[in-house]
Image (cartoon, helix red, strand yellow):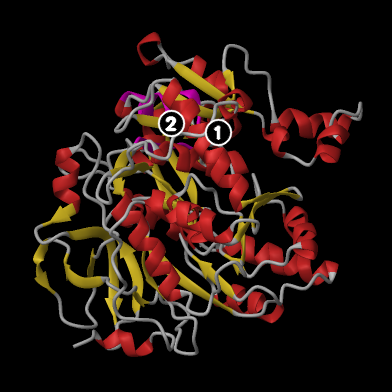
Amino acid sequence: MDAPWVRHYQPGVPAEIELPTESLVALYERSVAEAGSHVATEFFGRTTTYTELGDQIARTAEGLRRLGVQAGDRVAIILPNCPQHIVAFYAVLRLGAVVVEHNPLYTERELRHLFEDHAARVAISWDAAVGKLKAMPGDLALEHIVSVNLLKAFPTIKRLALQLPVKKLRETRDRLTRPAPGTLPWEKLLDAPPLVASHPRPGVHDLAVIQYTSGTTGLPKGAMLSHFNLFSNARQGEAWMHGAQYRKETFYAILPLFHAFGMTLFLTYGVLKQARIVLFPAFDVDLVLDAAKKSPPTVYCAVPPIYEKTALRARERKISLRSAKYCISGAMNLPDSVVELWESVSGGLLVEGYGMTEASPVCLGNPFAPSRRTGTIGVPFPSTQMLVVDPDDPTREVAQGERGELLIRGPQVFSGYWNNPEETAKALLPGGWLRTGDVVTVDADGFTTIVDRVKELIITGGFNVAPSEVENVLRGHPDLTDAAVIGVPAPSGGEKVVAVVVLRPGVALDEDALRQYCRERLAGYKVPRQVVAADDLPRSMLGKVLRKQVREEFVAGSR
């Protein structure tokens, strides 16, 4: 018997998907064979067909093989959204090697921890990030760094225009590329002949990706996602977007490909649907709307602030977004006001979903149908089960309607954390149930609402911030004796990072200096937006800072 929420699915959406029996290599090879001359990627107006994409993947795979990459090796990808990112992703997988995604804006300090953990010896990096890789200690020195110049993927006329001696153009060029001596240029990798078709392919249950996610310990953990996990989630997405057509959809890749949400939407599901994937290295609302005039989006997935900015600017510029039929918001709370605004300018419903890196990432979503319920994260995806349990005793299921921790089980759920059996044991319960750390209520129809978090992660701009990681940086500042980092609601949805600090005697608070100190050591989204001083911090009997109480006191004092 189907779960009660299945009757609220959009008509045509199945309760179960057909589980994959092949790897993601079969996914992209099928799309290359079937889509052929159809456009696969668009980047600042320059297009690449599926045939061309397949050829570049085969050549890059052979180039990596000649660098010594073998099945099971980890290969770091440190790239913004660009055509080379898609090629690199599938070239690594074609060899049976493992993709390790990284935020190219991470600092050298942040990257160092990840490389210490996954021990990749080859990296494919945006040339502007190469300096951070070369600054890492000798024991982490990479055998090969392949540098990617984004401008090489631009249309020729735009690339030449950026060479003009104009200050604004020079600044744009400097943001997009930097010299990377001592590296192997991406184009040299592409000079290799195509990998022989008989080269062994990975199995469906082989490890495909290590995707890092912030944990409550403050050190990111590498979620191990198999070909089966990622292929399953792509098929679940295909089932959910019932009516989306092969070779007819245009996906706007605004969310970063290095983030689990963007990876599944564009690198796997978008390629599965043989879609035109329009890539943006960073969100620029006018750049997006300029592209919309030429290639109108049909699939537009983002976070609430991006929906709001896009809708307002489109209305101002009188640019139609009626082509956008499939719109999913995730990673942070979706306000009703944003839903109403977006749906007033677009051609479809804006629905909220829910996911975790550990679940490839999507687990629940609102139907693309009148049965959707704003304010909730929807119902479980096809082939996905959920339980709501007592957070202190996850073996005890709570009554329907009561608050409890959400557990998820399905083919998209990961196998554990890389090199971290202790954290794996905490996250995965017997029977394959994943502890989400989110406290929810579920109504009789299965529609789920997040009411609290067991974990103390801060979600800002769709990214997870571990408070203890930021606290560890702040505690290294000579003016401070302690710090507590909390997330407080932001007007646009989600949270902003706030640091409550204890100063050494006789020291005055210099908020700008503290934020600059963090900026030098952390990615921009982790830097506190506000720093406030306190005489002391509330603590438990064991001396542990009680962040929840810090947050309550801060919110009460802000009213």
The residue segment tinted magenta is 97-116
Could you say where residue 145 lies in the image, as x and y percent from the top left? 51, 20
Which residue has dot 1 on it?
515
Q: Residue at x 41, y 29 (%)?
A: 473
Place residue 74 in its image quadrant.
top left
Please state the horizontal and vertical placement of residue 28, each as a whole percent of the image.
47, 52
Name the residue rendered at 25%, 43% in the picture.
539
Q: Nearer the viewer, residue 491 or 494?
A: 494
Q: CA distance from mark 2 to mark 1?
A: 29 Å
- The answer to whether residue 96 is left or right of residue 298 is left
The amino acid type of the residue labelled 2 equals Ala
Q: Residue at x 52, y 40 (%)?
A: 57
The residue pinned by badge 2 equals 76
Within 10 angstroms of label 2, few (less than 14), some, or many (20 or more) residues?
A: many
Q: Is residue 465 magenta?
A: no
297 is higher (above) or lower (below) than 77: below
Which of disc 1 and disc 2 is earlier in sequence?
2
Left or right placement of residue 59 versus residue 441 in this view:
right
Q: Name the quadrant of the N terminus.
A: bottom left
Task: Classify residue 465 by image quadrant.
Answer: top left
**Residue 546 in sight:** yes
